[in-house]
Image (spheres, rainbow, N blue to C red):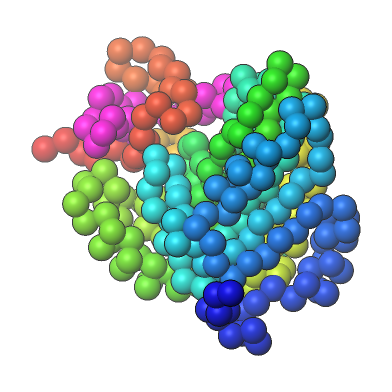
Amino acid sequence: MNPTPFAPDAPWRIDLTRLATLAERPARDWTIDIVDETGSTNADLMAQLRALPRNSTPAPCVRVAYSQTAGRGRRGRAWLAEPGNALLMSVGCVLKRPVEGLSGLSLAIGTVVLDALSRLPLTPSARPALKWPNDVLLDDGKLAGILIETAWNTPGATAVVIGIGTNLHGAEQLATQVEDANRSSAAASSSTPGAAPAALARAWPDANLTETLAALLNALDTALPRFEAEGFRPFRQRWLDAHAWAGREVALLDQGLEVTRGIASGVDESGQLLIDAPEGPRTVTTGELTLRLARERP
């Protein structure tokens, strides 16, 4: 048996009793598994969902790790975090929608994170915002990232894993780690707004894993049935209201090379990005290209 890598009385550990009080229904009805370390919470739940019968609709299951040795973000990028400094969680569930009906799910989950933040005692000056397609920003820094993966699908249901990583403390230390990890990648430069890490402690000095997890569970408890019933449509206006780069010039990059630029005008009802480009209106599918604020051409 491997030894516990972190002290059992570490002050940043999740208080299960308090969690059950703050997130009453999810704590009672969902499976919540909290471990010291794993490779990836998303990978753990993907394996668990793949083992389910294709006609099953279990209650959501949650996997939280204090440390991940193979945490991933969009396009396979590493997700870096020190124990206690970030909430690393995944939620596995079966949504009664075909896989094509999950369009816009990552954007909807972005609004879920904003809902959760609104339940926490942030300073009034805090400015959470959303960056297409799967980032939550705080004062122009990346506070949280979202990774959606599907384990299986049938004509009427899809087993999906929703990964959410949220920085709570240690933004400066994390920025150094990210810069070192991405030093050879111009597209991932931390000088780009929305790429440099931000931590919740900036707006909530007493940020802790227990209250943050409870807020996210409660927000997900409301949002998942709504998305299952109506898709992205009821979340769209909330997303537009929090769009960090609305009306600003953005650049679309493919493998780090700019392919076009234009004014970000919003998203459609399926979550596709709408850009007013020089060649005309353009619709961008989630995951197709990388979005950055445009820089002046030399």
Question: In screen coordinates, is 177 left or right of 92?
Answer: left
- Label total for image: 0
Where's residue 104, x and y in %? 60, 29
Q: Measuring 70% from the left and 20% from the top, which residue is drawn there?
A: 154
Where's residue 220, x and y in %? 74, 47
Tell me if I can see residue 178 in this picture: yes
Q: Measuring 33% from the left and 61% from the top, which residue is drawn there?
A: 178
Dividing the picture into quarters, in which one does residue 162 lie?
top right
Confirm whether the magenta stretch covers residue 63: no
Task: Indicate the quadrant containing the N terminus: top left, top right, bottom left or bottom right.
Answer: bottom right
Question: In screen coordinates, is 135 left or right of 23?
Answer: left
Where's residue 45, x and y in %? 63, 47
Dividing the picture into quarters, in which one does residue 107 lie?
top right
Confirm whether the magenta stretch covers residue 263: yes
Where's residue 277, x and y in %? 34, 20
Q: Measuring 61% from the left and 44% from the top, which residue is drawn there?
A: 47
Boundaries of the magenta span: 249-272
Q: Measuring 24% from the left and 37% from the top, which residue is drawn there?
A: 256
